[in-house]
Image (tube, rainbow, N blue to C red):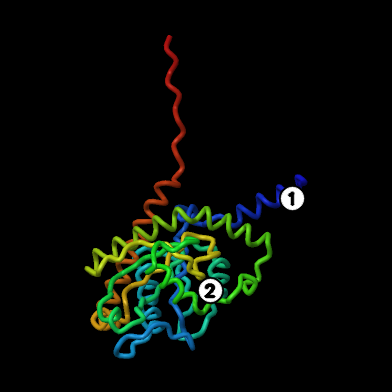
Amino acid sequence: MTLRFLALARVLVLLCLPASSLAAERPARIVVDPGHGGAQEGATSPTGLLEKEVSLQIAHRVRAHLEKQLGAQVLMTRDEDQSMPLPERVEFANKQRPDLFLSIHCNAMPTKRTRARVQGIETYFLSANASNATARAAADRENAEAPAAREARGDSTLAFILHDLARTEAHQDSSRLAYAIHQKLIAATGGSDRGVLQAPFYVLNGVEAPAVLIEVGYISHPEEGARLGRAEHQEKLAIAITEGVRAFLAEVRKRDAPKPPKVAAPATP
């Protein structure tokens, strides 16, 4: 392996590092991803409320609070009801060099019995293996729109390796971000705490920044599904997500702040 190749590899890896360490030097740059859109409607409530509509409404509120409360620069993968394939969402996010990536969704159960019973909030970060059957089912449902093969994303071997390096660097911060947001959501809404979980969500795979997917509630549940359509509940969710981001960024800034140089003790005579 030549020195020239090694130098190039170092530069490429540095370019793929998560941008969270930059958050101390400028306003945070955050990509908000409203799930589904266009022909991809997502889950449906018992009264016909669509996940694609709820996720977009909440995403707009999250953007407004992030901008107002944190002075963040917020970009959205979609700003209206339009189709946007999952690979394009990842590509869009990485082009922005964000500090954080937030994907907003509503959950659902498949059977009449479980739809009537299961409700609550789940927050996810990426893992090759799902935490449990619930996490696997959520990932399978959200990944239904994904290409069947990795080749559809156009990955070369080198690009895949670099993406993997970037994901490794961001993984620990993704966990911290998920816990920070989840705690705020449960405290603000009083929703059922279904935990911080890990699963192989396509939209999180390849994002070169701390990234989480937030299932803000079960739209399939009669009561929770109705709440998700109400403006006051959406505001609670948006404010809680913003406060979770605030807590995470404060932790990152404290961790990444330059350490004062150690002063040598005066020599004893």
Instruction: Give left or right: position of 93 versus 70.
Output: right
Q: Position of residue 101 (x, y in %)?
A: 46, 65
- In terms of image quadrants, where is residue 162? bottom right
Q: Which residue is mark 1?
A: 5
Q: Which residue is mark 2?
A: 89
Identify whether 43 is placed above or below 240: below
Badge 2: residue crowd in 10 Å (few <14, some 14–19, many ≥20): many
**Residue type at tag 1:** Phe
Regarding residue 164, the answer to whether it shows in the image is yes
Instruction: Give left or right: position of 97 versus 245.
Output: right
Seen as rendered, the residue at the extreme top is 269
Identify whether 125 is placed above or below 104: above
Q: Which quadrant does the C terminus fall into?
A: top left
Query: Which of disc 1 and disc 2 is earlier in sequence?
Result: 1
Q: Secondary structure at mark 2?
A: helix
Q: Position of residue 147 (x, y in %)?
A: 58, 76
Real-space CA distance between mark 2 and mark 1, rounded to the nearest whole angstrom: 31 Å
Query: Relative to the observer, which residue lies in front, 3 or 258?
Result: 3
Q: Secondary structure at mark 1?
A: helix
